Image (cartoon, rainbow, N blue to C red):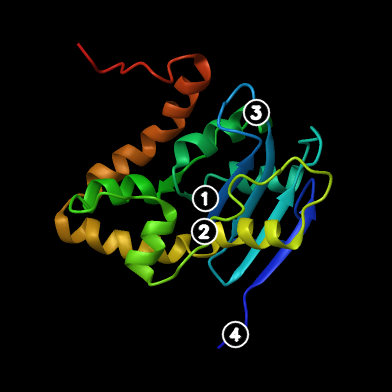
Amino acid sequence: MRAQLAISYHRHDIPDRLRFGDSVAVDTETMGLSLWRDRLCVVQLSAGDGDAHVVHFPDRDYAAPNLRRVLADPETTKIFHYARFDLAMIQRHFGIVCAPVYCTKIASRLVRTNAERHGLKDLCSELLGIELSKQQQTSDWGAPALDQAQIAYAGADVLHLHALRRALDALLEREGRRPLADACFRFLPARATLDLAGWAEEDLFAH
């Protein structure tokens, strides 16, 4: 058993040697929650192996060829929590339609209809028995350098997404809602594009 988790810090891109296999957990940190006003500052990734990679963008240099390769790979499923926002930020800043994707928040809302909370902290606590700290959630992610507390926080947000996916998949299968979840996941990149195109608040399916 490994003694501790490993979180690596990178600036502007991941090393060329990094490989994540057929699924990678992904999250982002931004200067705020507006898709157009606020910029992307951090992308964090994990292969589900206990390691996380925190990629910091202290300026607006988003060339990142190695990161782009991972995010755009059609053979790699990208696991998010609340994918809608992250996908839109990735599309805006990298020009990438990120697919295929899996969203633990959508999976939870589809299958945990007995629960009132579906945040990442809640899912980790209730499904995995892991308590996440959200102390750095409103941190200054656009700073010239990240401190150790920020790096640890960012890494923690992706370290458990593979385990959450496994737990939620079991519930989706049990309740017969896996096909519906898959259809929602396939629509998510289009939902992000709609958000960026100005339809963030409008329900296109309403009368």
The residue pinned by badge 2 equals 22
What mark, if any, has residue 75 been given in the picture?
1
- Structural distance between the alpha carbons of marks 3 and 4: 38 Å
Q: Of label 1 and label 3, which has the lower sequence position?
A: 3
- Structural distance between the alpha carbons of marks 2 and 1: 6 Å
What mark, if any, has residue 15 been given in the picture?
none
Q: Of label 3 and label 4, which has the lower sequence position?
A: 4
Query: Which residue type carries mark 2?
Result: Asp
Numbered disc 1: secondary structure: loop
Query: Which residue type carries mark 1?
Result: Glu
Q: Position of residue 17 (x, y in %)?
A: 75, 62
Judging depth in this view, the residue of 122 and 178 nearest the camera is 122
Judging depth in this view, the residue of 95 and 76 nearest the camera is 95
Q: Of label 2 and label 1, which has the lower sequence position?
A: 2
Residue extending farthest bottom: 1
Query: Which residue type carries mark 4?
Result: Arg
The residue pinned by badge 4 equals 2
**Is 104 left or right of 112, judged from the image as shown?**
right
**Circle 3 crowding by C-alpha within 10 Å: few under 14, some 14–19, many from 20:** few
Q: Quadrant of the C terminus?
A: top left
The residue pinned by badge 3 equals 38
Q: Are marks 2 and 4 in contact (CB under 8 Å)?
A: no
Q: Of label 3 and label 2, which has the lower sequence position?
A: 2
Q: Of label 4 and label 1, which has the lower sequence position?
A: 4
